[in-house]
Image (tube, rainbow, N blue to C red):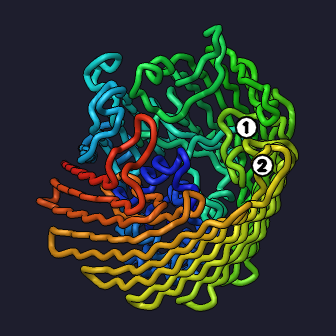
Amino acid sequence: MLADDEEVESSTADDTYDMLADLAEHKMNVNTATREDLERLPFLTEGQVMDIMEYADRYGPLRSVAELSLVRSLDVVRCRLLSFFVYAGERHVQEGGPRLDSLLSHGHHELTAAVRIPFYDRRGDRDGYLGPKYKHWLRYRFGSGRRLEAGITASQDAGEPFFAGRNKAGYDFYSFYVVARDMGRLRTVAAGRFKARMGMGLVMNSDYSFGKSFALSSLSHTGNTLRAHSSRTEANYLQGVGATVALSRHAELTALVSHRLIDATLNADSTSVKTILTTGYHRTDSEMERRRNTSQTTAATSLALRYGGVHVALQGVVATFGRRLLPDTSAVFRRHYPMGRTFANGSLSYSYSSPRLTVAGETATGSSGGLATLNTVQLSPLAELTLTLIQRYYSYRYNAIHASSFSDGGSINNEHGLYAGITWAASPSLRLSAYTDYARSPWPRYQVCLPSTSWDNVLSAVYMRGAFSLSARYRLRMRQRDDDHHAALVDRNEHRARLAVTWRRTGWYSTTQADMSVYSSDGQSRGWMVSQSCGLSWRRLMADAMVAYFDTDSYDSRVYMYERGLLYAFSFPVLYGEGIRYAVRLRCDVSPALMLMAKYSVTDWFDRSHTGSGLQQVDRSSTPVAELQLRWRL
């Protein structure tokens, strides 16, 4: 799993998973992949990207993906990850061509449809929600190798009106996009709805987000990225046009302009915005009133110079809202929230990469004042050993509307921190890693009335040999929160541990996993879970099954587990209380063009007669759900 456990509940988790699923479904040819292509794989460091390209140049085209294990900087974990995203094809074959007619004639069509059917009613389904209880979506994609992709995604959340009310056009959300790459000097052009990242994300990053363990890999990628917004996430995207143009062999220019409507809660005067909303839910009359009731216009540019391993870039971003942002600042922690209509930010990013050393950073400021700087050093004195150091300083006065990068608190302000990590491939089969991350917030935060600190520590080990793999992980996270009187801070400590054993052979796999969590503050809360999953594949049929028993004292000691779901569908249940969860997934590749998939999952709680609250409350202790999916390719 690329994300840390608690980050599966973040607003970017679905979009991140969708991006990875799309890369896995449309693998790249490692023998023709460019540096920019490999940098799209977020678990590869800058040095590993350089090593892969150097190996392919020195020893000729790879005959199989297994040959990547000979790249010394790639450990067994990343080699296995790469097998899901790349293949070894003929080097001389150019997929498509630079001409539009050639791209269109070499293209492939793909249509995917899915529906989620709950066999229960929420209170809102009976009285409160404007639409039916079924969640469904459609996705059409046209692709011509790596050079051209275009498509449209339409999605509907449960409870939203469908071909009714304010959704007379059918679905509640549509996303359309066109992205072309390597068209002469035009490196990338994106139109419609797209994602963008510049530098290390201190002024612009609407792209993917990961937990600390894997965010380190992509931090050293200081180049600019434009990609399609093909997921069903209704926030954190751009709408307009963006392009990256090669000015010369060593210089490139990226520019974009975006205008879109966003959801917001307005103040009583209806002329200013109290809160920007990102959930994308439009199920009730009040949620409909907040739907797309203001606008956001963004212009950004970046001039980047690259010579050998040295990369320097200047970024600038201006964001303007249709209504003035005027949050309620009566609470101290909101005192420095963004206020106004126009926000400007600029930054300088820089990096140096060599086979053994990578140094990267970005320093930014903006019209709201304050400074943000993020700097990393990754040193590999041996091919098997990587040392990482990350320093960040985000002023509590710094605000950047489109910023997203490495942090402990989730935002790029009010945090000073230092991270130190080590990864050691002790043998071809054993990989050990650890990190410690200390952060301080000099200004109060939500539920933290005073300046506070946090300390995050992780130890992990992965052993793989043949069909057998064993992974172990322990995390200790110490944070400060308000006491019951909101007058002082108390320590909040979380212990989480996981042990998993997997057997994997051609045609089947089996994983047994045990999880433990302990939360302590004024009192103590404990939780644990044991789970078993297995899968079989035979000819055109694949089947997966999973069962888990969990028992936690409260939500604070909740447990997490990965569960195989439908294509492009994030499935990582968060479980608390006492109960059992089980799921079965079946897939049939009817033909090379047609795939059918079905999943049935149930959570049974033993300690309650209902789940959820408010309009989401289900007046029963069991929540069975069926999901169906069809994919057609041509």
- What kind of residue is marked 1? Gln
Q: Which mark is residue 589?
A: none
Q: Nearer the viewer, residue 565 or 266?
A: 266
Which x, y percent locates residue 355?
A: 69, 73
Q: Quadrant of residue 584?
A: bottom left
Residue at point 40%, 24% (across, down): 284
Which x, y percent locates residue 431?
A: 59, 83
Residue at point 66%, 83% (across, down): 424
Relative height, residue 426 to residue 459 (above, below): below
Residue at point 60%, 27% (across, down): 276
Q: Nearer the viewer, residue 451 or 467?
A: 451
Relative height, residue 594 to residue 107 (above, below): below
Residue reaching furthest left? 590
Q: Is there any visible trace of residue 391 in the rendered image?
A: no
Which x, y percent locates residue 611?
A: 40, 49
Which x, y percent locates residue 626?
A: 24, 52
Q: Which residue is mark 1?
A: 315
Residue at point 48%, 86% (across, down): 464
Q: Quadrant of residue 450?
A: top right
Q: Nearer the viewer, residue 317 or 234?
A: 234
Q: Which mark is residue 482?
A: 2
